[in-house]
Amino acid sequence: MIMFTSSITVLRAPLLVDRYNSERPDWKQATRTRVTGVSVQPTATTETTTEPRDQVVTGWRVYSRAGVDLDVRHTDRVELENGTVCEVVGEIARWPHPIRPGLVHHVEFDIQRVRG
């Protein structure tokens, strides 16, 4: 059974134009939006131990309650309650409501942290 007792903070960075005329996110100026009542479940962890460095990738899946659409984009970052900052991985899955056409039943998306 999924419990919706966790909170996350969605980090959204404005885009800057660099000296090469390319857009890049400015994470120092990111907005922070706290979201309560979600479920954050571990998915997988992988470890690569090749020289010259080790790398650990840890993943979670975030679920919203039924009837709740979250304002989150694939370009955002997510901060967990313990302060861990993760990248959103892939597209946001907005599940259609089975009875109310055009509405979202719930949202699911993956996040991951890469260390090393």
Image (tube, rainbow, N blue to C red):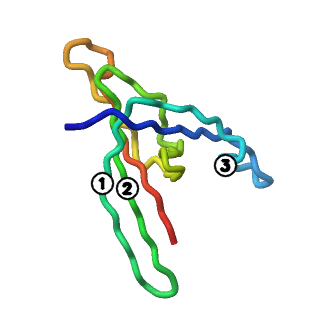
User: Is residue 7 shown to the viewer in this render?
Assistant: yes
Label annotation for residue 43: 1
Residue depicted at x 34% and y 38%: 39
Query: Mark 2 or 1 closer to N-term?
Result: 1
Residue depicted at x 67% and y 38%: 14
Residue 60 coordinates in the image, percent (x, y): 36, 50
Q: CA distance from mark 2 to mark 3?
A: 24 Å
Q: Amino acid at mark 2?
A: Gly
Query: Mark 2 or 3 closer to N-term?
Result: 3
Q: Are marks 3 and 1 in contact (CB under 8 Å)?
A: no
Q: Is residue 93 above or below residue 42?
A: above
Label 2 Cα neighbours within 10 Å, binned few <14 / some 14-19 / many ≥20: some
How many callouts does the rendering have? 3
Q: Residue furthest bottom?
A: 51
What residue would you read off at disc 3? 24
Question: Residue 19 versus residue 47: which sits nearer the camera?
Answer: 47
What residue would you read off at disc 2? 59
User: Is residue 23 shown to the viewer in this render?
Assistant: no
Q: Residue furthest top?
A: 100
Q: Is residue 49 above or below residue 32?
A: below
Label 3 Cα neighbours within 10 Å, binned few <14 / some 14-19 / many ≥20: few
Q: Amino acid at mark 3?
A: Arg
Looking at the rendering, in which quadrant would you find the N terminus? top left
Residue 78 coordinates in the image, percent (x, y): 50, 44
Label 1 Cα neighbours within 10 Å, binned few <14 / some 14-19 / many ≥20: few
Q: Nearer the viewer, mark 3 or mark 1?
A: 1
Residue 69 coordinates in the image, percent (x, y): 39, 24
Kindly state the secondary structure of the residue where label 2 is placed: strand
41 relative to 25 in the view: left or right? left
Q: CA distance from mark 2 to mark 1?
A: 5 Å
Q: Are marks 2 and 1 in contact (CB under 8 Å)?
A: yes
